[in-house]
Image: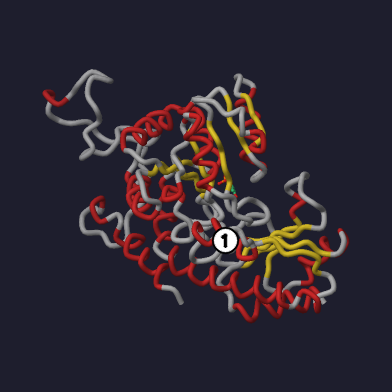
């Protein structure tokens, strides 16, 4: 097993050392929405004339609270930059787009919900252009939104390529890296300007938290996102933040097992495809041959991938023929999941199944899949 994963365990467990209070090992949940002001009248100032003293808790929890700040400290280390937590991945996307406020966003295929947010922003004048039309059209001030590995297939797109196209034109690149959290992918190393994660997936890892993150390269930009978040009201609530902090402690070991499992499963399926009559196609970045894939995913691809089966009927029946995969949406959980994806996304082929690999034994998962595909 690769030690690359465990290097991250130190940050996952100790990244919040500076924001720890009163020597607590397991943190409390701060449910208060308000905190007391300074007692000393000399320390009371008119709103907006002084920055908030970071050594004191925020006066109102829509602005900030200790549970969220503590998780952000851990995420800053895991995700390579100052990070802002939101109540969902979609509100994180809304937060970054509202602050950048571009006239145009180039956006590719991918998670349908992100497109839903983009369509809401179209009402106030945002123009959406397909990612394929970027050449010759991209201009200064535009934003490129790249999802990689992309939903629902888990195929990798070249971050460096789109970073160059964006930066040559004076545009910015957001990478939605939800499918490949660290250490699988480090989007800043390949030219991304901002990273988005739906923390509802791998970062939380147990299908019990809705959360999102934007990671930036500088603290000033983070402050602006936090200021906007205070008005939009999309901060992650205390209980979810507390639970996410707990979940992050096991991210590296969860991901190490999920990653090893998916590598074995994809290899098995591709080597035995001819013996599995119902299996028509396998999508996963481990099967891609372009040079950038190995460079950007040195440890292998996302633990989420997709298959196509012979026909729609088989696709609808397969989830129930499996014992170890829940037929459910979402991804990133410790439990393996499978989804007949057309249920959620009408633009996806009706023979496609998305599979999110959990931490069960790889051989058990392989046997389960092989039996059902025969
Ligand atoms: C789930 C998901 C989102 C949206 O995140 P929520 O936390 O569900 O709001 C965004 N992008 C991708 C790639 C996702 O899988």
Q: Position of residue 47 (x, y in %)?
A: 27, 20
Q: Position of residue 264 (x, y in %)?
A: 61, 75
- 91 displayed left or right of 349: left
| Residue toward you, 4 or 171 | 171
Residue pictured at 39% horizontal, 41% vertical: 216
Crowdedness of circle 1 by 10 Å Cα count: few (<14), some, many (20+)?
many
Residue pictured at 62% horizontal, 36% vertical: 107
| Residue toward you, 197 or 173 | 173
Colour basis: secondary structure
Residue pictured at 42% horizontal, 67% vertical: 5
Place residue 33 in its image quadrant.
Answer: top left
Question: Which residue position is annotated with label 1?
Answer: 302
Q: Position of residue 280 (x, y in %)?
A: 81, 65
Q: Position of residue 342 (x, y in %)?
A: 77, 51
Circle 1 sits in a helix, a strand or a loop, which is it?
loop
Q: Quadrant of the C terminus?
A: bottom right
Residue pictured at 29% horizontal, 54% vertical: 16
Residue 118 against residue 368 in the figure, above or below: above
- 130 displayed left or right of 97: right
| Residue toward you, 60 or 276 | 276
| Residue toward you, 38 or 13 | 13
């Amino acid at each position: 097993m690769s030690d690359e994963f465990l290097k991250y365990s130190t940050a996952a467990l100790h990244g919040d050392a500076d924001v720890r209070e009163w020597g607590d090992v397991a943190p409390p949940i701060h449910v208060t929405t308000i905190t007391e002001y300074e007692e000393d009248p000399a320390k009371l100032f008119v709103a907006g004339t002084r920055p908030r003293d970071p050594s004191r808790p925020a006066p109102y929890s829509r602005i900030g609270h200790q549970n969220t700040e503590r998780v952000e400290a851990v995420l800053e280390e895991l995700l390579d930059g100052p990070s802002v937590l939101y109540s969902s991945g979609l509100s994180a996307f809304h937060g970054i787009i509202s602050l950048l406020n571009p006239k145009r966003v180039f956006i590719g295929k991918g998670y349908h919900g992100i497109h839903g947010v983009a369509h809401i922003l179209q009402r106030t004048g945002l123009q959406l252009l397909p990612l394929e039309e970027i050449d010759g059209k991209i201009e200064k001030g535009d934003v490129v939104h790249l999802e990689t590995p992309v939903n629902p297939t888990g195929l990798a797109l070249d971050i460096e390529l789109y970073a160059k196209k964006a930066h040559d034109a004076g545009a910015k690149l957001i990478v939605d890296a939800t499918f490949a959290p660290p250490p699988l992918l480090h989007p800043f190393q390949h030219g991304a300007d901002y990273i988005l994660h739906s923390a509802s997936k791998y970062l939380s890892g147990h299908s019990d938290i809705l959360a999102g993150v934007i990671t930036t390269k500088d603290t000033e930009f983070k402050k602006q996102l936090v200021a906007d978040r205070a008005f939009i009201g999309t901060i992650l609530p205390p209980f979810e933040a507390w639970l996410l902090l707990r979940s992050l402690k096991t991210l590296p070991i969860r991901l190490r097992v999920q990653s090893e499992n998916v590598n074995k499963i994809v290899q098995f399926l591709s080597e035995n495809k001819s013996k599995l009559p119902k299996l028509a196609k396998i999508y996963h970045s481990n099967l891609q041959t372009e040079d950038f894939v190995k460079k950007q995913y040195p440890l292998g691809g996302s633990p989420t991938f997709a298959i196509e089966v012979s026909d729609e009927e088989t696709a609808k029946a397969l989830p129930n023929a499996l014992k170890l995969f829940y037929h459910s949406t979402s991804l990133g959980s410790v439990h393996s999941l499978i989804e007949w994806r057309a249920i959620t996304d009408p633009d996806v082929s009706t023979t496609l199944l998305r599979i999110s690999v959990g931490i069960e034994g790889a051989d058990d998962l392989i046997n389960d899949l092989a039996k059902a595909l025969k």
